[in-house]
Amino acid sequence: MLACTAPAQALSLQIEDAALRPAQAAATRQLLDTTVERLPPAWAAALDRRVAVEWRDDLPAQVHGRAKGRRMLLDRALLDDWMARPADADSDDPATRAAQAAVLHELAHFYDRSPHGGLSRDPRLLDLAGWQVSPLRLGLRVGHNAFSDRSPDRYELTSPAEFVAVNLEHFLLDPDYGCRRPALYRYFAAHFGTSPPQADCAPDLVYLQAGSDAPQPLLRIDPARVYAVDYLLAEGNERLMSRWGHSMLRLVICAPERPRGPDCRLDLDHHRVLSFRAFVDDVQVSSWRGLTGSYPSRLFVLPLAQVIDEYTKVELRGLQSIPLRLQDAEIAALLERAARLHWSYDGRYYFLGNNCAVETFKLLHDGVPRLAGERLASITPTALLRRLRRAGIADTDVLEDRDEARRLGYYFEPLSARYQAMFEVARQALDLPQARVQDWLDLAPAERTPVLRRADLRASAALLLLEQAALRRQELLARDELKRRLLGGDAQDPEALAAVRDFLGLQALLSRPATLLPDTGYGLPQQDERDALARLSERHAAQWRQQGERLRTEARRWLPPQRSAALETTEGNVDLLAGRLRELHRDEGGFRLR
């Protein structure tokens, strides 16, 4: 029996294998000594007992060690590789890294089970690790870890104890750990009172913008340039899935030339939105699949302008942008957590149990430790807003004066009221029988055409806005018709379905950015990975846009004749009004709306 004890530490590792040759025993002692030297003093001091070390040939495949009682069992192949290393092998040598990682992994289990450990039961560690709280389970945690992308070792996902052991390996052995998993690095450093050497990290945080026409999909955000974070609520409508609204977070990012301050709220082109959405990969949203969690839940990063258009112009839903009372350090921590989700999280979307409100709540809970102590758990966006307001976190006072809220960008009103006002202009000028704009838009496009031909300048301008809205509506109806046709049994068109699948395949790559970096690292992307991401994302985004344009063109021939005719007639109405406006403008010598 050979003792291997680090001076001034209580930990004692004893080699209990009488069959070891002297060279093997010496190599084992060297391995244990060099590994124990890496332990933080608090860790080593907590293991105030002797641990017997045995080399075994009977461990399961892919298992390098076991921590049982006071015995550490190690795979003998690790010793063979350790002894076969070059004499000048450094810490990056694969055999060196594998053997030391196995010893550290088992020592981490011993520490975690000690009175000084308990990391795998610490709520904050569970938040950071990915065993998130569940609003529907009275604060209990989900039973699985969905942070499966860009993992250093998927074995960490099997249990909190294994997560601790795997991550403590990297905390002590990987200089990049503090860059790739910064929140966990800070957690372990604070717990042990020591900070292992850390590499220089790539600046800022990076995200992949989805669904954007931006030529550069890869987005860099410097947390110091984010002035505020708002709770962004899309108001509900009559649709079942939208009745309680949609939860998002708005990042108020300052323009590069603007000093950080309240005026950054004017820089709308630079603002971004964090939005959890179900990624639909089958060309149709199914209520049943939404209830059973068949859709992936992903964190999308979108330009604010795109979100405003989507809700106020297309869905005719208002947007409330309510500031959250967060300190600068809390904003930085929230952005860092959002980046971890963006690159690692592959959750399941449930209409009730894990929807946009639940995901947004979990992001706030996990990203800002102070908020974890508040009673914020909610399953609807409006309920989450009420709880944020009651906790003094959401400043809803900005909405009290609706005119001022619109002026300052705290409220973006739906265009439905504007559409009704424009319709009133046309109704009075043309003596239309309809009283509501909705009734006018419900007419067949061909029924509206003769009226458009006799509109004056002012009425033509108003009707152009309405025909453009009617065109967006027809495009949505055509899209829904196409979905039903493609999935309609005997009516299924293999060529059309294949084209849609190809388009959605490219979109899936952009919605799950980790797939663009297979086997290149873990955690937050660093500089070499970012360079590769910039090239790949630009290429995929260009292909996605090209295929989308081709799909929109080809889709016309897959539509039923009646729907295709309605779409073409509405486009003709828009062209007719645009031409009539140009003609009337020339005739009247100017363009003035009274």
Image (cartoon, rainbow, N blue to C red):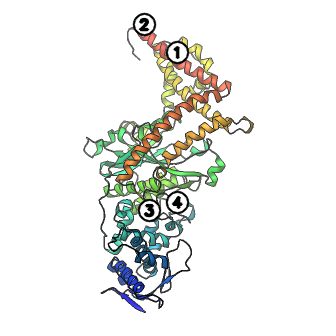
Work out which residue is located at the far bottom of the displayed protein and give it.
1
Q: Quadrant of residue 280?
A: top right
- Which sits earlier in the primary sequence, circle 1 or circle 3? 3
User: Residue tagged by mark 2?
Assistant: 587
Element under disc 2:
helix
Of the numbered discs 4 and 1, the one sitting upstream in the chain is: 4
Is there CB contact under 8 Å for labels 4 and 1?
A: no
Which comes sooner in the sequence, label 2 or label 1? 1
Task: Determine the image quadrant of residue 476.
Answer: top right
Amino acid under disc 4 = Ala
Q: Nearer the viewer, residue 311 or 406?
A: 311
Q: Residue at x 53, y 35 (%)?
A: 547
> Which residue position holds label 4?
146
* Secondary structure found at label 1: helix
Residue neighbourhood size for the residue with mark 2, other residues' Cα within 10 Å, grouped as few (<14), some (14–19), many (≥20): few
Location of the C terminus (image quadrant): top left
Q: Check disc 3 and report its element: helix, strand or loop.
A: loop
Q: Is residue 324 visible?
A: no
Q: Which mark is residue 576?
A: 1
Q: Which mark is residue 374?
A: 3
Q: In the rendered image, which quarter contains the N terminus?
A: bottom left
Q: Amino acid at mark 2?
A: Asp
